[in-house]
Image: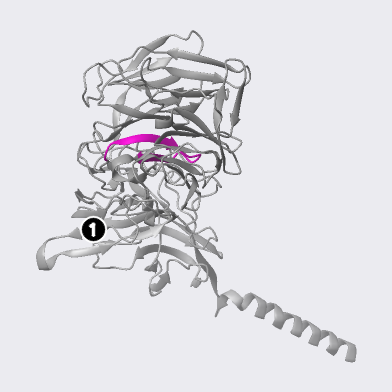
Amino acid sequence: MKNRISLFMVILVSLFWACKKDNKNTSNGIQKSTVTIGQISLSSSFQDYGAVNENNKNALLGLNSSNHNAIVSAGSSLPVSTWPHVYSGLAYVTYNSRTQGIAPVKDSVSVSNTAGYTRTLINDTYDITLVSKTTTHIADSFIRYSAQDTGYVINKSGPINFNAITTDGVLTIAISGVKPGTLPLFTVGTGTTAQKFNFGNSNGYYFLYIKNGTVGTLTMTVPSGQVLTRSITVAANNQYNVVVSQVNSVAPLTLTFAPFSLNTLDIGQGVGTVNVSTYAGNGLAGNTNGPALSSTFYTPNALTVDNTGNIFIADAGNNMIRKIDPSGNVTTLAGNGSQGSTDGPGLNASFYRPTGVVADNQGNVYVADQFNGKIRKIDVNGFVTTFSFNGTNYVFAVNPTNYVFYANLYSIALDNSGNLLWTSGSPNNLVYKFNFQTATLTGITGQYNTIPLGLAVDALNNIYFCVAQQIFRIDNTSGAVTVFAGTLAAGSQNGNLTNSTFNNPWGLAFDKSGNLYVAEFGNSKIRRIDIGGNVTTYAGSGATGSADGMASLATFNNPQSLGFDQSGNLYVADTQNNKIRKIVATK
């Protein structure tokens, strides 16, 4: 009997715990489930203004995912090429049961943190809505949307996924296209009733969501300091990706729209991406060393950039060779400031209006010492010597007596084989090439009316130089000399190689892509000849001055020399401004 009672008690206890376990999702026998918010997808794709996105990238990331707002497509690790929508603020989720007598349930949800949201509901069929919290704002820094799941059967715990719609459009602007320290602004209305909206920022872009049909004005300051505006009528499900562009380099800047990509935004050479700044020199004539912008120069005639980022300058008026190191500190490499031709330690040596400078890969610097008619060399220790050649042997020596005199020596360069090139004036106006390996000197061409200037060499070792209003080319294979660009007439016409005109082109430099840049002394411009033979104005309005800023509005004063660093930045010897300028092209 005792054993039967014990067995009965065990059965009762077991039944009690079984009933208790089943009642975790029941109430008085009513079954319940716990739901969360899962993935939300837009039911229609956002379109770039004027162009439909090529791929279906409308899926949004699950809001309770650790990848929320990450710049990847849902279910992928690849960077997206459409805007990854930003969620924030509050939303309301409402559950309307189709069974009479069950009251609607409405929750307020923090959209940026849905991971902790749960709701336990009676198992039933529901009409469920998820709606951004109503706001009177015409624009905001998060997307507003609504979603509805009609006839949704809840019979087990788990996430609920939504297909959402929105009446918002979005404005996006690359942060790099806006002047640091300023913010874009979107204004609706005028006068005292105007509403002004600031942009959010994410993933390197400013952004603003704006309600469908809103008419407003975007105002932004571009890196040059210019303030640009554009009126916009926003349509739902459209992305307006704003860029700065120009029809040509002298046309007014405008705000336009371009397809969006988080990886690259290629807006061509639309200026707004090309800017001029003063890199060194305060504009006064002098020879002060120190921080770049407080230093002084006196008619810097030429510059070169070595492979470690040092800039060497033939500071003609000071009879010195100056150096700007990669940290922006200016020093005197050689020259005591007096007119002379003394060799020796750099600061004891003397020059007489040096007008050309080039650096080799070993750290040596070669100088065209114009009025001395000498080729000088500054070695890695700063020691200065003079080139001497007797027709068979050469040497760089201290104050040699048998050096060769080159009248009106001017430009100097190295070709891709390490041969030294230079130009000299009367009586023959020659381009010279000296081969260090064979100790041979060649006068390549001559008999021009004026001195050849501005030596440059392309990737195929062809040599380019300027004479009067034209640019010439010496073919590396045949040695043939031809006119490369320009006519006999002075001018500033852009176009092709044969009809374009220049006004005293002086300095030349190639970029890594093979485009040729021209420092135009007479027009105070920097011109560009692309690999297709198209001549354009790269920087400079044509007015004389020293204004920095957007390339088309910047001004120069008789620039004479150019040089690129390894990052593709272009440096200009802005001779009559006593400055070194820097041109940065950013896409």
Neighbour tally class for label 1: few under 14, some 14-19, many 20 plus, Cα within 10 Å: many
Colour scheme of the picture: one colour
Q: Quadrant of the N terminus?
A: bottom right
Taking the spot 45% from the left edge, 37% from the top edge, the residue there is: 564
**235 and 492: which one is in front?**
492
Q: Position of residue 416 (x, y in %)?
A: 55, 24
Q: Secondary structure at mark 1?
A: strand
Taking the spot 61% from the left edge, 36% from the top edge, the residue there is: 362
Q: Quadrant of the C terminus?
A: top left
State the extent of the magenta-drawn residues as a range: 557-573
Q: Position of residue 224 (x, y in %)?
A: 29, 50
Magenta span has 382?
A: no
Which residue is denoted by mark 1 in the rendering? 186
Evaluate whether residue 475 shows in this view.
no
Q: Position of residue 296 (x, y in %)?
A: 37, 51
Left or right for 167, reference 335? left
Q: Position of residue 507 (x, y in %)?
A: 37, 30
Q: Quadrant of residue 45?
A: top left
Q: Height in image: 257 above or below 181?
A: above
- Callout 1, which amino acid? Phe
**362 and 51: which one is in front?**
362
Taking the spot 84% from the left edge, 84% from the top edge, the residue there is: 7
Q: Height in image: 440 above or below 117?
A: above
